[in-house]
Image (cartoon, rainbow, N blue to C red):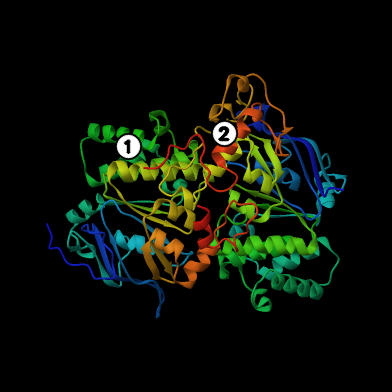
Amino acid sequence: MSVLSVSDLSVSFSDPKNPDTKIPIVKNIDLTIEPGEIVGLVGESGSGKSVTALSIMGLLDPRSALIDGSIRLQGDELLGHGPGTSRALRGSRVSMVFQEPMTALDPVFTVGSQLTETLRAHTRISAKEAKRKSIEMLDSVGIVDPEARFYSYPHELSGGMRQRVVIAIALLCGPELLIADEPTTAVDATVQLQLLDLIKNACEATGTSVLFITHDLGVVSHVCDRMATMYAGEIVETGEVSRVLSAPQHPYTAALLGALPRPETRGQKLTTIPGRVPIPGTEPEGCWFADRCAFVADECRQSHPSLETGPAGTLTRCARIDEIAPALAATTGPRRDIQSAHTTGGH
Amino acid sequence: MSVAPTAPADVKTNGAEPIIRARNVSVDFKIKRNKTVTAVSDVSIDVTPRSSIGLIGESGSGKSTLARALLGLVPVTSGSVEWEGHDISKLSAAQMRRFRTTAQMVFQDPHSALDPRRRILTSIIEPLKVLGIGTKADRQNRAEEMLSLVGLRMDQANRFPHQLSGGQKQRACIARALIVEPKILVCDESVAALDVALQAEILNLLSDLRDSLDLALVFISHDLSVVAHISDRMHVMYLGETVEEGSMEQITSAPEHEYTKKLLASQLTVDGAQTAREDSAAEAEVHS
C-alpha cells in the first residue's frame, strides 16, 4: 500500500476582498508515495507546491482554505475531520522540516526541551527515557557532543546544526512520511550536501518516505527517486527522476533545467521563462503554460491538456508532446549540453 | 589623475588600472570589551574596469565584510583601500559623494532593501537626491531610463514593494544602484533569495548590463555554479582569508586548497545517474 495517496486534491482560498469567491490554488493533484520512496515536488514560487504540502500536513486554516479530494495516509483518509481527529490521525506519523531553521525552533527553549516535548506529546514516555532517546537522535543526525548540545539554545548553533536539530525533531517519533519544504535553501553548498545526504540516509535507514519540495533540480537529482513538476497548481510532468531529467517531455521542466547555471553555460545566456505564473483564477483557456511556452501553437489554446503517458514512460501534460518531445530531446540532449529555444547563445 | 603604483606580483590586474585597489585589508570587529573577531584578514584585491570578480565562501568567511570594506561601508583595521590614489577612509565629504557614484551595491534580499512605505520609483530616484544630482525633471528621466534598462514598466515602478515579485524587486534594486552610473556594481548574494527561473533572469540581466554599461562586477555568493557562471576571476575565501585566487577555469579545473576542492565536490548536478560526490571537477570538464 502506498504510504501517501493524494487523489484529486484541490485547494482554494477565499479572496480577502470578496469572501464569497474561492480562488483555486491547487488543482486536481494526484500523487502517490511508496514506502521508502523520496518524491520531489518541483516548481517556481507560486506553483502551489507548499500549499500541497501544508494541506497534507493539515496546517491550512480551515476558515480560509477549502480542501477537496482525498489524502490517504496508509489508507486512512486525512481530510474531512475536525482539528482533534485530524491531529490524532497525523500524530507522529507525518512530520515536516521547514526552510528556515531559526524560525522553526523556539529561541527561548533549549534544543533538548524541544526534542523531548515532541516525544512526550506523541508517546507515553518517562522524562529520563525521552532525554536518552533525544540525545541518541541528536547523535544520529551528526551533531557532535550531543549531551552538551542537548542543553544549547538555538542561537548557539550554526545554521547547518540548527537544521540538523529540526531534522532530528522531525524524525524523532519515527514518522511514516517526512515532508521537507526547501530544507537546504538557507545553507551553504557544503552543508547542503551534508543535510541532503543526512535526510536521504536517515530515511533509508528507517524506511521513512519523503515528499521533498524544492525549486532546485540539482537537489532533486541528488536525493529523489521520482519527481513531479508543478505549474500553476497542477502537475505537468511526473516520472522517475533519471528519466525526467535526462529527457524532459514538458517544455516547463526543460526550461527549469535550462535556467540552472552550469559549467557548460558559462558566458552564455541562461534559459529564462518569460512572464509569470498566471495569477490564480486568471489561467488562460487551454494550456496554462501556453503564454510562456517556446513551443506554443494554436492547438495549445483550444483545450486544457490532460496528463498522459508519453514515449519516455513519464506522465506529461502537453498537447504537442509528440512534436515537442523530439525537439526538446534534440535541444536538451540526453545529458548535459542543454540549451533551449529561448537561449540566444553566448557573447 | 593619480600616480600609477605598480601592483605587487601576487595581484593580477589584467593590465588595466584598477578602480579600487585593496591591499592587505583586515577587518576586526569588537565583540566584547577585550575580544575582537577578525572577519577579513590580509586580503588584497583589485577591481579593474569591466572585470567580473567572484567572491565565494561559506557564511562567516568574510566575503560580505570584504565587499563592504571595498565600498568603505566598514572601516578597515589595517591595510588600505584606494580609489584614484586616495585612501577611501580619508576621503572628504565631497570626494566620498563622488566615490559613491563609482561603486554601488545590490543586496541579498530585495524586499528588505526597499522601503515598504515608498513607491518603487521614489526609492530608485533617492540616490540622486541624496547625492544632489540633477534637477527634479532630470532625475525623473534618468529613473525612466533605468527602468527600461532593467526591464520594469512605469506602472510597476509606481507600485509599492509588496506589490511586486521578488525578481521585479531585485530589478528595482539594480536600477537604484545603477542610476548614479557607477563603474563597479557589488552584488552581495543578489540571487540567493530567488528561485531558479528568476535567478536565471537576474543573472542574464547582470551580464547584459556588464557588457552594455562597461561595469565591473563583484559578485558574492556561496553558490559556486552562480559565481562560475558570471565571473572571470574568483577569490575563494575561508575564515577571513583568500585561500585561492585565479581565473575561473583555473580554479574549477585545478583547485588547490582543500576548501575549494570540498566546494567543487559539493556541487549538485542534474545528471540522474551521477551523485554529486562522484562528480569531481575533472569529470565535469570531460562531459562539457
Name the residue tied to disc 1: B146
- How many numbered markers are drawn? 2
Q: Against B244, is A311 above or below?
A: above
Q: Against A136, is B159 above or below?
A: above
User: Alpha-carbon distance for marks 2 and 1?
Assistant: 25 Å
Residue A303, picture quadrant: top right
- The image shows residue A203 at horizontal and vertical percentages of 75, 60
Q: Tell me, yes or no, if residue A188 can be seen here.
A: no
Badge 2 and badge 1 in a common chain: no
Residue B134, picture quadrant: top left
Q: Residues within 10 Å of mark 2 (few under 14, many from 20)?
A: some
Extreme-bottom residue of the structure: B34
Q: Secondary structure at mark 2?
A: loop
Quadrant the C terminus of chain A occupies: top left
- The image shows residue B15 at horizontal and vertical percentages of 22, 59
Q: Tell me, yes or no, if residue B35 can be seen here.
A: yes
Q: Against B283, is A40 above or below?
A: above
Camera-nearest residue between A16 and A166: A166
- The image shows residue B169 at horizontal and vertical percentages of 44, 41
Q: Chain of mark 1?
A: B
Name the residue tied to disc 2: A277
- Badge 1 amino acid: Met
Q: Residue at horizontal 64%, vertical 60%?
A: A196
Camera-nearest residue between B91 and A347: A347
Q: Chain of mark 2?
A: A
Give the numbered dot on residue A24.
none
Q: Residue at horizontal 42%, vertical 67%?
A: B237
- Badge 2 amino acid: Val
Q: Secondary structure at mark 1?
A: helix
Q: Relative to residue B18, is residue A340 drawn left or right?
A: right
